[in-house]
Image (cartoon, coloured by chain):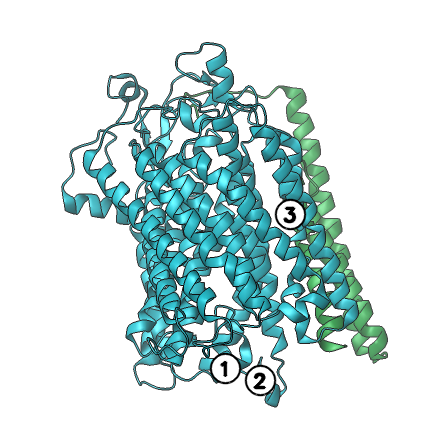
Amino acid sequence: MSHDAQVYVRSQTEFEYIKQKRRKDMRNQITTFGIMIFLTLISFTAVAADFSVYLIVPVILLLAAIQVVLQLYYFMHMSEKNHQVVAFFLYSAVMLAFTFILTFLTIIWWG
Amino acid sequence: MSSIAKKKGFGATIWDYLTTVDHKKIAVMYLAAGGLFFVIGGIEAMLIRIQLAQPDNDFVSAGLFNEIITMHGTTMIFLAAMPILFGFMNAVMPLQIGARDVAFPFLNALGFWLFLFGGIFLNLSWFMGGAPDAGWTSYASLSLASPGHGIDFYALGLQIAGAGTYIGGINFLVTIINMRAPGMTYMRMPLFTWTTFVASALILFAFPPLTIGLFFLILDRMFGGNFFDHTMGGNTIIWEHLFWIFGHPEVYILILPAFGIFSEIFALFSRKRLFGYSSMVFATVLIGFLGFMVWAHHMFTVGLGPTANAIFAVATMAIAVPTGMKIFNWLLTIWGGSIKVTTPMLYALGFIPSFVAGGVTGIMQAAAPLDYQLHDSYFIVAHFHYVIVGGVVLAILAAVHLYWPLMFNQMLSEKLGKWTFWFFFIGFHLTFFIQHFLGLMGMPRRVFTFGANQGWDLFNLISSIGAAFMAVGVIILVVNIIITVVKNVPAGNDPWEDGRTLEWAIPQPVPFYNFKQTPLVRGLDTFWIEKQEGNKVGMTYAEPLSDIHMPNNSFIPFVMTLGLFIAAFGALYHGEKDWAIPVLVLGIAITVGSMAVRSIKDDHGFHIHKEDLMNDKGGK
């Protein structure tokens, strides 16, 4: 890498653009945070309201999956550019984990 | 640290290696340590073959025989084959992609020390009450019942060594994703880099199941857990699944880099572009993917049911397709090439028929009904030695000859190299080909002796004679290495004269910063393109000469590992000795303490200045 000093001055338009983008990011983050709290509330309410276990478990699992996606995309920045490789490895891992769990369920514990 | 090299004393050199973060020195240490374990594993193999050379032999006892076969398998896979391949990956891959080092040099050193200490810990079992004796697969019911501390050494040692491998794998992934030189697109990466990449991805996904399995085993044996004990509600089959979810990708972690090495050799010594480059990349990725979908083919006889067996049988057979693509691509690379039969090329030519034979028997076993006949017989032993020795070990021996001038600036003797090849190659087929028939005649694997006059006597003797041939081959290689090191004739760069990829373009001996200026990659086989265009320096540069940022050496990886090594003794003697818990705590404290030091202390590395690079020493 070159380490000769380089000074780069942003133009006014670039500055405005970045400012706007950051504002949008912040709004997204707070919205996501709100949604996540709401999802958590639903899970707690479902348990507190004493619904059937067969309802509670799938609902909580579903909400958990949504939370994970929101977490990855908005808090861990996967929605931004240049995250294809990370996404590729993450989805590969999800797929493999799914295969392993499916096999464990079908041929060890249920079979 | 000064960027001007001084002549070093012996102690200073040792200290340099203990603290180094340079990928080339770490590569040398991987090669040396892996080579040592290869010899230990080889001696164990010789003991096995001596014991089995004649019927009703009592050269070793049954218990000792179990320890020897377990340690032979474990050592060869975890402590010899994988580290030696890691050595070549470390030495060659950063040079192939035009990087100054791997992405995390500190972690690279940490990975090496973890592997070494794990390996030493495992082998200490020989002197501390007996080695593990439940086979390298260490199936849970058997390993839980094993008396003594052998299995504890296995579980703890592999846990430490496995952490090292995992760290190394992540390091290679990040390096290849982020540190390629300008112009080095994914589809211009040499095949060895590609296979390193896919093998590292396999490490990333395959080692966590092993880690979990080993932790369960550690808890069951040392801390009163019941994961695998069915009388307490556990399930012994879970170990088999976890082990093979790791274990099957593991064999591809070994064979893919071997494929990469042979791809380089075929192109180099056929003096021709690798045939079907993109299909080779595709096949590599596909093998990596399918490698995760087939683990239960090791467990056909467990009783998974016909549906599961059928699914895993079909998935297994599918792997033959991308592997076949590779074989044909190699043949077509040689076809019409201007072939030079050097020692590495000889290994590559020997590899094709050997590996195909191993692959074909693999497909036979993939047929679940036939596997019921072959399971736990010598046919299986013959099969996996055909793929691992015929594939991985031939690749390692080829790479030793191929990359020796790159790593040490010396050429191994071609004449002795060819002697090694013929002894090893003939010995290999003599040892293992006949074992197919021993298996078909009903000889079970992992038996310490056999009765006379069952028709097995002569075949076992022939097999043992073959093993002696292989030993002679390895001894000639060691002699060759000693002679070469003593003579110390500089080889210069591009010693094979037909180097195609970037690593051969670098001046010898390779400067510790690798590239004075980062190269610009203008296509597949960069160096070849430059040579064709008459470029004397062999590289087009992507940047002007400027300061180079380098990491400082560090002793912390060694200390961090030492902590885990000490802690492992505490865990091992838990519930038996009073000092166990204090030692466990002390060891973990050392590790956590050195992690804290690493985190808190800022280490920004140093710069090699442009002026130093421009003088005649070139910053050395």
Question: Does residue B26 appear left or right of residue B340 in this picture?
Answer: left
Q: Which chain is green?
A: A
Q: Position of residue B587 (x, y in %)?
A: 33, 68
Secondary structure at badge 2 equals loop
Separation of marks 3 and 1 at Cα, in angstroms: 34 Å
Task: Inspect the image, locate mark 1, and give the three-letter code of the amino acid beneath it.
Answer: Leu
Q: Is residue B206 above or below residue A28?
A: below
Residue under mark 3: which chain is it in? B
Question: Which dot, 3 or 1, sits closer to the camera?
Answer: 3
- Of residue B550 and residue B439, the one placed in the foreground of this image is B439
Q: Earlier in the sequence, mark 3 or mark 1?
A: 1
Q: Position of residue B87 (x, y in %)?
A: 40, 45
Crowd class of label 3 (few under 14; some 14 to 19; many from 20; radius 10 Å): many
Residue shown at 67% from the left, 49% from the top: B320
Q: Which residue is mark 2?
A: B229
Question: Does residue B412 appear left or right of residue B87 in this picture?
Answer: left
Name chain B's colour.
Answer: cyan
Crowd class of label 1 (few under 14; some 14 to 19; many from 20; radius 10 Å): some
User: Residue B79, which numbered label?
Assistant: none
Q: Which residue is mark 3?
A: B287
